[in-house]
Image (cartoon, rainbow, N blue to C red):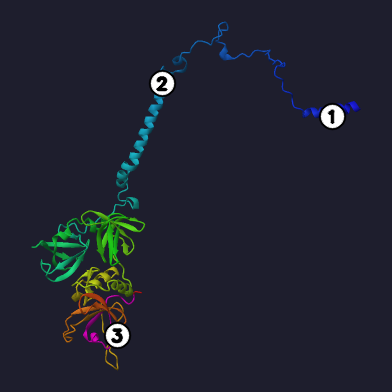
């Protein structure tokens, strides 16, 4: 019994014993060789000549496999790969040409007359294809009564504004007619005959400048100044990026303008009427500007010029001249105070336009000047020295109330 326990315990420890590596120089047990009792007969070895220990004779590739000499060589395989690659490249080129060149020209004809929006051809109606039309290329151009800069300034025309060429004149001037029917003389060098910059249907966006002025630059950022354009200048654009537009310029050039202080509309849309407070805000941007007869820009303004551009950008069409503006809108007749008999100025609302007689002859009822009510008891008008346009306070007892010829309200009270 003791011997059995000893053997069992010895067997357990033998499991964990490492096999001893043969010592260098010691005897290495011979490797056994496995002999096959039954040789394996492989079919492809039947053609071998056992005496010479060589493989069978070469096969005829064309007779047995149907391969030509070129196909049976590696060189033929390389040529076939080259041809396949060339075919693949040619197919890719044809695909690109088909997608980007042929299809855009074929598909519109196939779907012509359908209601599919992608293939509906835009209708282009050219408004200014008549050869008599011209486009103003300067920021502002004075419209003179005669072909002489010392004569009366009838009005001003703005950058990119269409006009109709009537005839040439002396001193480098020509006679034109504005789209609202005014005729006069401007410098011919201020006009171009290329009208693409004002054709609505060939552009994507219509832009109206609502700030007193905006700069048109050569590049979207860090460009140089091309032109300074004024309030109510109308531009057309085809490209819109974040914060900027690329606009078409007279003569075929393009420039970039910032989106702030610009009203974006569809090409043929008109600005909608807003409340009179927006009109007053536009008027106030011209306070303390230099006065110039019938001027309508921040570089030289008149009250009628400021009324024209401020009304237009806020949705009201109005004439340019003071005489015609006195007929616009609705006439307001303020009631006098029952005790004093004087006009109660709180009946004159912000946005109302007041037409006044000559202060030296109040009995003369012809219009001498005009003013805009910007707040109760405050008027926007020409300074007494006639050098600037500025604000002036008035009350019911002032002499200015005795000079009132008519009051016109051009903005609807229904608009809020």
Location of residue 336 in the rendering, given as x and y in whole percent from the top left corner? 27, 89
Residue at position x 9%, y 62% in the image: 171
Q: CA gap, disc 3 to disc 2?
A: 105 Å
State which mark lies toward you, 1 or 2.
1
Report the quarter where the N terminus lies: top right
**How many C-alpha atoms fall within 10 Å of the one at disc 1: few (<14), some, or many (≥20)?**
few
Q: In which quarter of the image is residue 139?
A: bottom left
Location of residue 399 in the rendering, given as x and y in whole percent from the top left corner? 23, 87
Residue toward you, 104 or 161: 161
State which mark lies toward you, 3 or 2.
3
Residue matched to label 1: 9
Q: In which quarter of the image is residue 334?
A: bottom left
Asked if residue 408 is positioned above or below residue 203 in the image, the reply reads: below
Of callouts 3 and 2, the N-terminal one: 2
Asked if residue 401 is positioned above or below residue 309 in the image, the reply reads: below
Location of residue 100 in the rendering, given as x and y in whole percent from the top left corner? 33, 42
Of callouts 1 and 2, the N-terminal one: 1
**How many C-alpha atoms fall within 10 Å of the one at disc 3: few (<14), some, or many (≥20)?**
some
Per the rendering, the mark at residue 295 is none
Residue at position x 33%, y 58% in the image: 244
**How many C-alpha atoms fall within 10 Å of the one at disc 2: few (<14), some, or many (≥20)?**
few
Please state the extent of the stretch shown in magenta in the rendering.
Answer: 392-414
Residue matched to label 2: 75
Per the rendering, the mark at residue 345 is 3
């Amino acid at each position: 019994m003791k011997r059995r326990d000893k053997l069992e315990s010895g067997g357990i420890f033998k499991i964990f014993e490492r096999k001893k590596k043969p010592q260098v120089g010691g005897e290495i047990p011979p490797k056994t060789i496995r002999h096959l009792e039954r040789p394996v007969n492989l079919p492809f070895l039947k053609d071998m000549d056992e005496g010479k220990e060589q493989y069978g004779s070469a096969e005829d590739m064309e007779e047995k496999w149907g391969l030509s000499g070129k196909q049976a060589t590696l060189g033929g395989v390389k040529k076939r790969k080259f041809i396949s690659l060339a075919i693949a490249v040619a197919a890719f080129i044809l695909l690109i040409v088909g997608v980007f060149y042929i299809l855009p020209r074929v598909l519109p004809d196939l779907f012509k007359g359908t209601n599919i929006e992608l293939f509906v051809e835009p209708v282009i109606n050219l408004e200014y294809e008549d050869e008599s039309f011209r486009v103003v290329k300067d920021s502002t151009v004075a419209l003179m009564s005669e072909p002489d800069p010392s004569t009366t300034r009838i009005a001003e025309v703005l950058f990119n504004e269409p006009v109709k060429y009537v005839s040439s004149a002396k001193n480098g001037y020509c006679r034109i007619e504005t789209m609202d029917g005014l005729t006069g003389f401007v410098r011919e060098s201020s006009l171009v005959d290329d009208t693409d910059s004002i054709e609505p249907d060939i552009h994507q966006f219509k832009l109206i400048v609502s700030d007193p002025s905006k700069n048109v630059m050569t590049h979207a950022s860090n460009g140089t100044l091309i032109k300074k354009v004024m309030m109510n200048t109308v531009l057309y654009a085809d490209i819109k990026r974040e914060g900027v537009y690329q606009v078409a310029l007279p003569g075929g050039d393009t420039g970039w303008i910032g989106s702030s202080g610009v009203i974006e509309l569809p090409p043929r849309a008109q600005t909608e009427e807003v409340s009179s407070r927006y009109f007053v805000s536009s008027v106030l941007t011209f306070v303390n500007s230099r006065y110039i007869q019938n001027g309508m820009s921040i570089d030289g303004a008149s009250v009628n010029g400021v009324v024209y551009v401020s009304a237009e950008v806020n949705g009201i069409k109005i004439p340019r001249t003071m005489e015609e503006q006195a007929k616009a809108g609705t006439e307001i007749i303020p009631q006098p105070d029952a005790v004093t008999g004087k006009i109660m100025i709180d009946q004159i609302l912000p946005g109302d336009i007041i037409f006044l007689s000559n202060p030296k002859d109040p009995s003369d009822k012809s219009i001498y000047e005009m003013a805009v009510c910007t707040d109760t008891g405050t008027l926007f008008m020409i300074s007494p020295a006639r050098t600037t346009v500025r604000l002036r306070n008035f009350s019911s007892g002032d002499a200015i109330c005795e000079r009132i010829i008519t009051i016109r309200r051009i903005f609807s009270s229904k608009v809020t």
